[in-house]
């Protein structure tokens, strides 16, 4: 593979302590990795040169929370919400019915379309959850499809109780922890549980995370999205990589996150699309909690593949500075996935990069709704 020298980088937002925001920067890509970072004048030569003409460069976005394997359309539910209907977890069953009825080809085509959108918008790593099958067969095939697109596949059989088990939720938890987990664990890195009103309580969430850990899966929790509850505490207590949503937090929840190794993953697309109050990112950051931003792309609460949109919401509505929001969408997402090879620009990491038609990443929030992505590299290959 030829080495590539990127020059003319007006500002390199490296997300590292070593390089910080480097002005007049250059980067060398070799074998899919970053081989060298420095200022333009000191760059060694390479086989190919790309002049970025003063554009800023940042790491590819890391989307640590997305539900991409589904069928059907819930735009009518969105329209109803905009006229005052509340969001409930029950809407998930609409997508479950459509997903079960869809063939593998249709589901795969949907994931291909959404991941293409994500890559075009600068997301170079995406997590993909199951959770719209809720049978052994449909959860396993959802994950088999997800793994065609990502190494970060998450088993979310515990999204809601499957309709067949409406009168026996404990029986459904047994299925998730038993036969369903056995069929799904070979195709997943993570296990997730929706611990909230209308989904699973704290005890069920604990049991599911324990069973997942025994099967070798790391934990993630949909926590405290719809109301205050035990989700964040369970995530911290169980050593989950991430507690996601974190919309309704008590002081004890914030303290638990600050004391644990669990990342608070904020998903402002969901509050936008459910017309709900946003999580208080400022409070978490001030308490020293590691924070990630992710799209939560899903048909019910956040049908967006745009990390730039999430960054703009985080800055406008959640008290983040633009720098904090970009950090949360890059190295923050990498931390939520326990990855050190992505989310930063430093020698040795994957060459996942975005060049913006802008002098700094602040423009991602300053120019909302405008596509500023000039180029994207994934593993050193130009994909846009
Ligand atoms: O992250 N909260 C649970 N799951 C999704 C919503 C799923 C749906 O409504 O289809 C979320 O918001
Ligand atoms: Fe989600």
Image: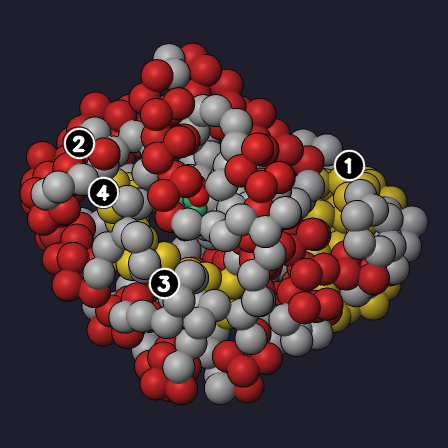
Instruction: State the mark number for residue 48.
Output: 1
Asked if residue 32 shows in the view, the reply is no
Residue at x 41%, y 31% (from the top left corner): 95
| Image location of residue 259, percent across then percent down | 34, 83
Count of all numbered marks drawn on residues in the image: 4
Q: Front-most of 333 and 69?
A: 69
Mark 4 or mark 3: name the one nearer the start of the chain.
Answer: 4
| Sequence-earlier tag: 1 or 2 | 1
Q: Give the side of residue 146 with respect to residue 77, left or right.
A: left
- Residue 372: x and y, percent? 81, 46
* Alpha-carbon span between mark 3 and mark 1: 47 Å
Local secondary structure at mark 1: strand
Classify mark 2: residues with Cα within 10 Å, few (<14), some (14-19) or many (20+).
few
Q: Residue at x 56, y 75 (%)?
A: 280
Residue toward you, 5 or 225:
225
Query: Label 3 belongs to which residue?
Result: 223
Residue 126 appears left or right of 380: left
Residue matched to label 4: 161
What distance separates the C-alpha of mark 2 from that of mark 3?
Answer: 25 Å
- Of tags 2 and 3, the one toward the viewer is 2
Q: Are marks 3 and 1 in contact (CB under 8 Å)?
A: no
The residue carrying mark 2 is 164
Indicate which disc, 2 or 3, sits on the residue closer to the N terminus: 2
């Amino acid at each position: 593979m030829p080495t590539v020298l990127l020059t003319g980088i007006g500002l390199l937002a490296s997300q590292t302590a070593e390089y910080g925001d480097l002005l007049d920067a250059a980067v060398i890509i070799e074998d899919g990795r970053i081989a060298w970072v420095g200022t333009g004048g000191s760059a060694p030569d390479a086989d190919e040169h790309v002049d970025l003409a003063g554009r800023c460069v940042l790491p590819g976005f890391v989307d640590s929370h997305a539900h991409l394997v589904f069928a059907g359309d819930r735009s009518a539910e969105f329209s109803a919400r905009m006229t005052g209907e509340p969001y409930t977890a029950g809407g998930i069953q609409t997508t479950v019915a459509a997903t079960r009825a869809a063939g593998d080809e249709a589901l795969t085509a949907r994931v291909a379309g959404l991941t293409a959108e994500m890559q075009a918008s600068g997301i170079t790593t995406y997590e993909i959850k199951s959770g719209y099958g809720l049978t052994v067969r449909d959860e396993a095939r959802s994950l088999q499809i997800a793994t065609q697109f990502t190494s970060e596949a998450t088993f979310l059989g515990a999204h809601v109780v499957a309709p067949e088990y409406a009168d026996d939720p404990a029986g459904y938890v047994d299925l998730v922890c038993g036969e369903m987990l056995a069929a799904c664990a070979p195709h997943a890195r993570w296990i997730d549980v929706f611990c909230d009103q209308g989904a699973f309580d704290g005890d069920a969430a604990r049991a599911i995370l324990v069973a997942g850990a025994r099967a070798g899966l790391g934990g993630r929790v949909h926590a405290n999205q719809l109301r205050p509850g035990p989700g964040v505490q369970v995530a911290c207590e169980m050593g989950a990589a991430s507690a996601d949503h974190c919309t309704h937090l008590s002081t004890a929840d914030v303290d638990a996150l600050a004391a644990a190794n669990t990342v608070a993953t904020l998903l402002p697309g969901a509050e936008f699309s459910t017309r709900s109050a946003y999580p208080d990112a400022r409070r978490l950051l001030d308490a020293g909690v590691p924070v990630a931003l992710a799209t939560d792309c899903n048909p019910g609460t956040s049908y967006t593949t745009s990390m730039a949109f999430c960054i703009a919401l985080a800055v406008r509505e959640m008290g983040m500075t633009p720098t904090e929001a970009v950090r949360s969408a890059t190295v923050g997402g990498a931390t939520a996935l326990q990855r050190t090879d992505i989310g930063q620009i430093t020698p040795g990491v994957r060459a996942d990069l975005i060049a913006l038609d802008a002098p700094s990443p602040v423009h991602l929030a300053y120019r909302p709704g405008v596509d500023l992505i000039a180029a994207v590299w994934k593993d050193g290959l130009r994909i846009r």
